Amino acid sequence: MACGIGVCMGCVLPVTGTDGITRIVRACVDGPVFRADLVRWDDVGTIPFDALGAPGWKPKAEGHLHAG
Amino acid sequence: MPADMRAKLGQVELPNPVLAAAGCAGAGRELAQFLDVARVGAIISKSIMTEPRTGNPAPRLAETPSGLLNSVGLQGPGIDAFLQRDLPWLLSHGARVVVSIAGQTVREYGTLAARLSDAAGVSAVEINLSCPNAEDAGRLFALDPATAGSVVAAVRGSLRYDIPVFAKLSPDVTDIVAVAGACVAAGADGLSLVNVLLGMVIDPARLRPALAGAYGGLSGPAVRPVAVRCVWQVAEAFPDVPIIGTGGVRTGRDALELLLAGAALVGVGTAIVHDPSACSRIARELEEELAAIGADQVADVIGRAHARGYGRAGSLPVIGGFRGSPPRANSAKAGEE
């Protein structure tokens, strides 16, 4: 974390919402407290493939190219 | 006598020439507890893409001498959520909004421009050219005049005619004037310089790169001389093209420096990470700096450092300064035009 106010996007964690969707959220403002069962502990420091906005989130209709 | 701080962005009048730079003001809401977003000159959104994007794995940030290294990776909610949630919030709180757009293909930039044409309240669009071109092995659009120009053409061609287009340039090029020229020729109404420099930190404790992505974008006071140099060069080559000068501005004195180099407006980015009230503080400090040198208005100092001193009301570009004000009787100008 650098800013502590939600603008630098440095303190992110993969957390699953109650809607079942994993989002890359900011610990500083979206937390700082999270339900322990919703934090994807094993995926901290990574981007889970199925997170919202990740390559596995939604099949792209036109098959966009990806860097990875 | 306090200086007149008003500036113009296209047809929109700003209360002052200090803008919150892209990527450093979040969606604007994050700054609301520290300042009044309506009193910032304008808020440049973080770069928006067509789809939601997670960004890169952490660690994404590293501190450098007088700087910050980031590899956030354009995390963002996508254009739908931005138009539905973020833009309305900013407008309802009185902010003037510049929307920064990013794309993986030339086509994506055009798509974003078309979507913004249907939105109300967009004061300008800033094209983030420091994005990897998925159709060219990830080479940044900003690095080549031709590719930069093709992105600008796609945006200008798809965006409503009355919304100005600013192309944000990378300083990591051999000839920034050439890239600037290509963007202007392609229809850019103004230029935003500069974006981050590529840099790297190796962590001596872990013996590994500090960032998960190895290298990232360097910003902050360490890069300010690069920004000043780029603004100087581009302003000299294109004196009629409005420039938003950004790079390491932390004080009113730094903002003045970029105005003197030829910027009509000044962006503040990394400083916000350390001081969330930076935009309003710097605007206040800039007003004091102008008063201290006897300038009555922002227009008096734009480009003043150039020997020919073209920062005179009559020869100003549309953006910047307060158009229509009479030339100052005591302006020490070379009598151009």
Image (tube, coloured by chain):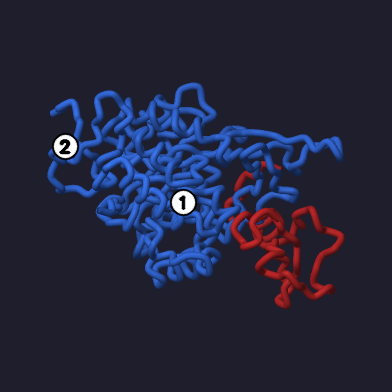
Task: Kindly identify the amino acid type of the residue bearing the numbered disc 1.
Answer: Ser
Residue B23 placed where, x, y %? Answer: 54, 52
The vertical placement of B45 against B210, above or below, is: below
Which residue is at 25% across, 40% downward?
A: B300
Is residue B226 or residue B333 the one in the foreground? Answer: B333
The vertical placement of B282 against B81, above or below, is: above
Which label is found at residue B330? 2
**Disc 1: which chain?**
B
Q: Quadrant of residue B88?
A: bottom left
**What's the colour of chain A in the image?**
red
Is residue B94 or residue B284 the one in the foreground? Answer: B284
Residue B126 placed where, x, y %? Answer: 42, 47
Task: Kindly identify the amino acid type of the residue bearing the numbered disc 2.
Answer: Asn
The vertical placement of B287 against B37, above or below, is: above
Q: Is residue B319 left or right of residue B41?
A: left
Is residue B187 or residue B316 the one in the foreground? Answer: B316
**Disc 2: which chain?**
B
Q: In the rendered view of the protein, which quadrant contains the C terminus of chain B?
A: top left
Q: Is residue B240 left or right of residue A53?
A: left
